[in-house]
Image (cartoon, helix red, strand yellow):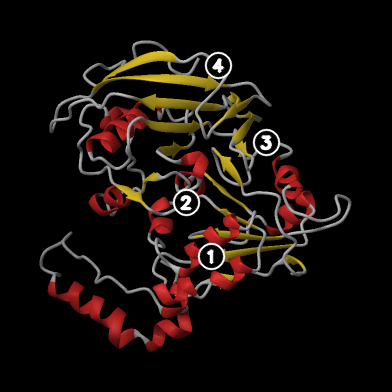
């Protein structure tokens, strides 16, 4: 915890001295002292519009609606991603154009200068909205998006974004998409783009002091009804992602099995009509979606080697789920792996073959065959 010393001295009676009293009461019981929680200060819950790069101008207009879906963070996209985004903003190709807003729930001013330099946009504005921000404070950020041609969501924890469901800010993002703008994100910012979102809210609530906890293939496949799995629907409704849930860092973090669990849960909970689809995007890969739903995969070299592209998964038959019973489910997967390879995301058509893979959550090696090849 970082203390602002001048303010801290003034708060002794309300906060620090209260904690000291708690400690004194427990002095005869070593090891039992628990400090009283300190509520967030009003300043820490206030959204921050960081210093922009460039000069905001009138909206240039878009050549979309288009989607930018990055499997890792916004700074880990393949070369050419920003150029593609810029090409979907109207304006002379050899001049700066387009207002870009980057929304985040954590972090600092991370992207503005690089995006401005490499994307040749007119203006890039990062906005931090802390998780404790009030709904009124979230809604107050909507005018930034209404002035924009592109809005991108950064990484982090997707539960912080899904908390904005129904807000004026999210309605502004929908309007931007409807008028032909580009919407997208990386990592958690990609996870929120599907029609059904794994929101991580239940996992955060059940493991509040464990920043390392995650729903994984290894804990979800043996118990697909585990309470840590929760979903949000009705956040966005992009046509290429209807009946679809997205997942990130896909091959690197072995999320194939957990995405099958998510599909089984979506069918079981009747959150989307059958068949339900999953789109897994590997770390370092990006899926760029045109207005007609045609998608192109781009890859880059990472510390794990060349990123593996995208995995389109469909579940046509809902498996029976019972508590504490490992999942056994059979799905079909098409691996769109080559850099520059295209597929029809809206209609789930690809020139790649669909392979059948069975997940058996009772086995240590749960896949009937290598799902990542």
**Does the residue at mark 1 contact the one at mark 4 (Cβ under 8 Å)?**
no
Say what secondary structure mark 4 lies in.
loop
Q: Nearer the viewer, mark 3 or mark 4?
A: 4
Marks 3,1: beta carbons within 8 A: no
Question: Circles 2 and 3: CB distance less than 8 Å?
Answer: no
Q: Earlier in the sequence, mark 4 or mark 2?
A: 2
Alpha-carbon span between mark 2 and mark 1: 21 Å
| Distance between the alpha carbons at the discs numbered 2 and 3 | 20 Å
- In the image, residue 133 sits, relative to residue 194, either above or below, namely below
Front residue of 365/120: it is 120
Q: Earlier in the sequence, mark 2 or mark 3?
A: 3
Structural distance between the alpha carbons of marks 3 and 1: 28 Å
For residue 44, say whether it is visible.
no
Determine whether 37 is above or below 356 in the image: below
Give how far across and how far down residue 37 sits, in percent. 27, 70
Task: Choose mark 2 or mark 3, whichever is in front.
Answer: 3
Where residue 78 is drawn, which disc sits there?
3
The residue at which mark 4 appears reads as 352
Left or right: 112 in relation to 34 = right
Q: Which mark is residue 172?
A: 1
- Alpha carbon distance from label 3 to label 4: 22 Å
Q: Which is in the foreground here, disc 2 or disc 1?
A: 1
Q: Nearer the viewer, residue 315 or 297?
A: 315
Q: Residue at x 20, y 38 (%)?
A: 226
Q: Are marks 3 and 4 in contact (CB under 8 Å)?
A: no
Residue at horizontal 71 percent and vertical 46 percent from the top = 82
Specify which label sits upstream in the sequence, 3 or 4: 3
Query: Which one is in front in this view, the residue at disc 3 or the one at disc 1?
Result: 1
């Amino acid at each position: 915890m970082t203390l602002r010393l001048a303010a801290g001295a003034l708060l002794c009676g309300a906060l620090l001295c209260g904690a000291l009293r708690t400690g004194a009461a427990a002095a005869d019981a070593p090891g039992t002292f628990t400090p009283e929680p300190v509520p967030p200060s009003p300043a820490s819950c206030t959204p921050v519009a960081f210093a922009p790069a460039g000069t905001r101008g009138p909206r240039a207009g878009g050549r979309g609606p288009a989607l930018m879906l990055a499997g890792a963070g916004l700074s880990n996209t393949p070369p050419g991603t920003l150029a593609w985004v810029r090409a979907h903003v109207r304006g002379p190709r050899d001049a700066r154009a387009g207002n870009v807003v980057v929304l985040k729930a954590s972090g600092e001013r991370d992207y503005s200068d690089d995006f401005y330099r490499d994307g040749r946009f007119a203006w890039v504005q990062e906005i931090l909205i802390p998780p404790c921000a009030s709904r009124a404070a979230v809604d107050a950020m909507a005018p930034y998006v209404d002035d924009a041609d592109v809005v991108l969501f950064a990484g982090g924890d997707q539960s912080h974004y899904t908390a904005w469901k129904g807000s004026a800010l999210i309605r502004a993002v929908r309007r931007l998409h409807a008028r032909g703008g580009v919407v997208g994100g990386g990592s958690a910012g990609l996870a929120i783009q599907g029609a059904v979102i794994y929101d991580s809210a239940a996992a955060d609530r059940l493991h509040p002091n464990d920043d390392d906890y995650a729903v994984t293939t290894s804990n979800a496949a043996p118990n697909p009804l585990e309470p840590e799995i929760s979903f949000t629907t009705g956040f966005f409704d992009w046509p290429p992602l209807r009946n679809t849930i997205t997942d990130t860092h896909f091959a690197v973090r072995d999320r194939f099995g957990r995405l099958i669990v998510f599909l089984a849960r979506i069918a079981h909970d009747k959150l989307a009509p059958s068949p339900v689809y999953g789109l897994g995007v590997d770390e370092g890969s990006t899926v760029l979606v045109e207005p007609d739903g045609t998608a192109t995969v781009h890859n880059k070299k990472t510390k794990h080697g060349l990123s593996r592209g995208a995995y389109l998964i469909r579940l046509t038959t809902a498996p029976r789920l019972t508590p504490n019973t490992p999942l056994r489910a059979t799905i079909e997967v098409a691996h769109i792996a080559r850099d520059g390879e295209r597929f029809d995301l809206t209609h789930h058509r690809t020139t790649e073959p669909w392979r059948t893979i069975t997940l058996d959550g009772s086995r240590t090696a749960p896949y009937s065959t290598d799902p990542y090849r």
